[in-house]
Structures are given as C-alpha cells and as structure tokens.
Amino acid sequence: MGAALTVARRELAGYFATPVATVFIVIFLVLAGALTFTLGNFFGRGQADLIPFFSFVPWLFLFLVPALTMRLWAEERRLGTIELLLTLPLPQWAAVLGKFLAAWAFCGIALALTFPLWITVNILGSPDNGVILSGYVGCLLVAGAYLALGAAVSALTRNQVIAFVLAVALCFVFVAAGSPIVTEFLDTRLPVLAEIARNLSVAERFGGFTRGVIAARDLIFFASFIGFFLFVNAVVLDHRKAD
Amino acid sequence: MAALIEIERLTKRFAGFTAVDDVSFTVERGEVLGFLGPNGAGKSTTMRMLAGFMPPTAGTARICGADVVDQPVAAKRHLGFLPEGAPTYPEMTVAGFLAFTGRIRGFRGGELTDRVAHAMGLTQLEGVRLQPIETLSKGFKRRVGLAQALLHDPPVLVLDEPTDGLDPNQKHEVRELIRRMAPEKAIVISTHILEEVGAVCTRAIIIARGKVVVDAPPSVLEERGRSLDDVFRSLTQPEAA
C-alpha cells in the first residue's frame, strides 16, 4: 500500500507540473457552471438544491475523464518509463492502484472547486446539505467508475486517440444503459436484458445519490465496478506492457 | 554460494520470430559481463526478462536466488536496472525523481536523503539536483538513470547501454565507476562499443540472432582474431548464402 501511495503522490504532482491540471479544472468548472445556470435553470427553478449541477456531472465526466485516462499508460509507454516503473520493487497492482488513486484524487479536487455553487444555494435558501453531500459522493463514485474503465482501456493501446474514443464509448454504454430509450426498447423485446441494463447503469445508481439516498447496494455496485476494471487493468498490463 | 545472476535456457518468442533463443549463463560476484551483439540481436530483450519486465516464453532467470517470475518483488529489490534509453519522468527534478525511486524502495527520512545525495555524488549530479530532468542534456539524463539504479547499492546491476550518449570524459567516469563497484557486485552491461568491453569487462558474451555465440574473457576473444572488431564481425554477420 505504501508503494501505491508513493506512485499516487508522484502522479498527482505530475498533473500539477504540467498544464493538464489547469486545462482540465478550468474547462470542467466553466462547463459545469455554464450548464448549471443556462440549461439547468439554476435560479429560475426557485429551489435551493444542486440537482441542476449534479444532473450534468455524469455527462461532463463522460468526456473529461477519458481525456485524463487516455494518457495514463500510453504516456508511460511513450516515455519508456513503464519499464522503469515496473522494474522497481513494487507489486504490479500497486502501480495500477497508485495511478487510479491519483486520478481519482484529482477529480475530487476538481469537484471540490465547485464549492461556490454550494455557497450560493446556502445564501439564497436553506438546502438540505446532507443531500448535497450525498450528491457529491455520487459524483466522485461516477468519476471513479469512469477512471477505472478508462485506465483499463489505456493499458490496452499505446494510441491515445484510440484510448480516448474507446473509453468514451464504453462509459457511454454504462450511462445510457439505464436511460428510458434503452430500457423501454428492451422492455418490449427482451425484458430480461432490460433489468440487467438498469442494474448496470451508472446513471441510474447516481440518481439515488442526488436524491440523498446512499444505498449499500449502490456502494457495492461502484466498488465492484471499480475493482473489476482495476483488475482488468492489471491483467492487460501484464500481457501488453512491452508492446 | 549460487551466482548472483542465473539465467537458464531463457527464450522469448514474439509472433513470428524468436528474439532470444535458449540463452543460459551465470554471473558471479566480482564479474562484469559485457553483453555484445548487433542491434536487434536480443540484448535488450534478455535484459528486460532478467529485470522482470517481460515474461519469458520459456526458461528461468534468478537474481540472488529469487525467480524473476515467481518472486518478482524480491528479485527486483536486489537489482539496479538502467532500461534502454534511460527513461525518466521529464517534469520531475533530479532530486525529486531519485527520492521517488528511493521511497518505492522503502527508504524514508534521513536515510532517503542520504541515499539520494550519495547516488547524486557517484554520478556527479549535485549541480543540477533541482533542475527538471527535461531541461538536462542527454548525458545528464543518462546519469540520472544510472543514479536511480545505484541508489540502493544493489548486489546486481543490469545496465542497458550505460555510456550511450555520453561524451568521452563522461564515458571514462562511468567506466571508472563500474570498475570501482565491480568487486562487490555482479554487473551486466550491454554495449556495442567494443573498446568498452576491453576497458571494463571481465567477461564478454556475444549474442547474435538470439543465440549466444561466444562466452569468454575479452583477452581470449582478442587472441582469436586481430582485434575485437574483427571477432565481432566474423561472429555476428549472417552466414553467406
């Protein structure tokens, strides 16, 4: 675990040593703010909550998180540092976990920087801050799910464009799985699959968190989702690290 | 006591060709093995398997008795490895990078600071310790890679082209360093500079098309031909059709 945290620390410092951090955070904050106030009708709906903000987060992360993960392993391969990192005395899972934790902490920082929205609703009304906190936990879990998936895809190819496009597409599958278009289509034809689709949907699970419900089964879903893709990441890395 | 490096029938096959074909050798403490061969002969692949980066298709490699596949972390703890091209994280400072590898190797606090300072001393990096690695010249970058491999004073050193890109003075310093460390360590260096073998190695292995063609002290090699160059060429050129 110590080695994983050492890797995470180095990675996180790496984000801030390059323009990656600034660009990511600025774009995220600008888009989140703009969408919340325009499409989300933050002021007009006259309710003191962050639902308009939370509803856009899974969609924003859908494009921003793969941009973060596409370079995760590809960059190590390009620089050749993967050979250095994986010949240091640390178990392979520690390298995978360290990279994931750094990216996750980074997403957490980006989310935390949306605090002016929270201050705004608290000044304008008296929101249920428990619900807001649960919403943020949900956002973080969605980011974690996308990150784990994107990191595994990034281990698969050294081409960053392919890593990005594939990660967006796969994340989209898990968001869209629970949308009415998909489930209604499946309900009429293959009801069994509709239930599976709903259960695998990241957006569906996230919805509970934004309503203030932190259910054990949703936490287990995200934990196993992240765990599964970190495992895939380690396996893929083992087979393709030298490619 | 068993040799510090033991390689037995090591083989690596990629789709369609065999990069390393049934290579066996051992390196004892006090030996400096020069690993020679034309480009693409399988030098780097052999070293990558020895360092536990690439899994072998067949055969085994052990470092200080630890199998690189079955006990990878134990094997890597005893190993200082300079990968081909001396890769480093460009945005980190020299001291920051060395501290990172030291921390992964389990050093903390004062010991970590001492180790980093010592490794920078061995490789003359003190003057650039707070510079980002990407701003350094090729020779300095190579020395940062070397410092990383020496930081924990490992019994086994595997250096893939340690003097590539260095100027003659720096080459001389690195060879001096290797000679000084040689008595307590088992060292493998790959190179295609033949004079280097005569200068620092106690033994030379020439590898061609994945197979070991010669395993002998440099002096014996020289007796076989007019010079190392001739021997190298005669042994590694593809046979005439």
Image (cartoon, coloured by chain):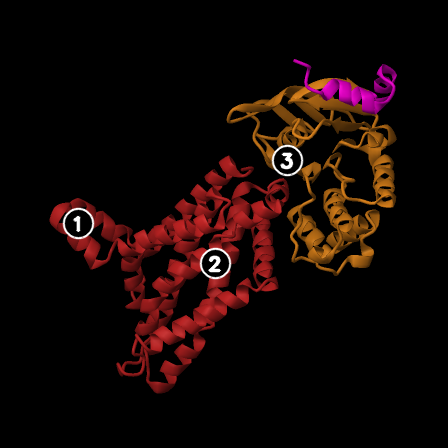
Q: Which residues are magenta?
A: B217-241
Q: Nearer the viewer, residue A70 or A231?
A: A70
Q: Chain of mark 1?
A: A
Find disc 1 in the rendering and name its residue. A186
Pinpoint residue B1: horizontal percent, then vertical percent. 75, 22
Query: Can see residue B156?
Result: yes
Could you tell me how far apart the alpha carbons at marks 1 and 2 are, in whole angstroms? 33 Å
Q: Which mark is residue A27?
A: none
| Circle 3 Cα neighbour tier, 10 Å, few/some/many (<14 / 14–19 / ≥20) | some
Relative to B224, say whether B165 is above or below: below
What kind of residue is marked 1?
Answer: Leu
Q: Residue at 16% of width from left, 54% of height from top?
A: A184
Q: Which mark is residue B74?
A: 3
Q: Secondary structure at mark 2?
A: helix
Q: Residue at 50% of width from left, 57% of height from top?
A: A103
What kind of residue is marked 2?
Answer: Trp
Q: Quadrant of the C terminus of chain B?
A: top right
Colour chain A is painted in: red
Q: Residue at 65% of width from left, 37% of height from top?
A: B76
Q: Which mark is residue A104?
A: 2
Q: Secondary structure at mark 1?
A: helix
Magenta span main SS: helix
Chain whose colour in the figure is orange: B
Nearest-to-viewer mark from 1 and 2 = 1
**Mark 1 or mark 2, which has the lower sequence index?**
2
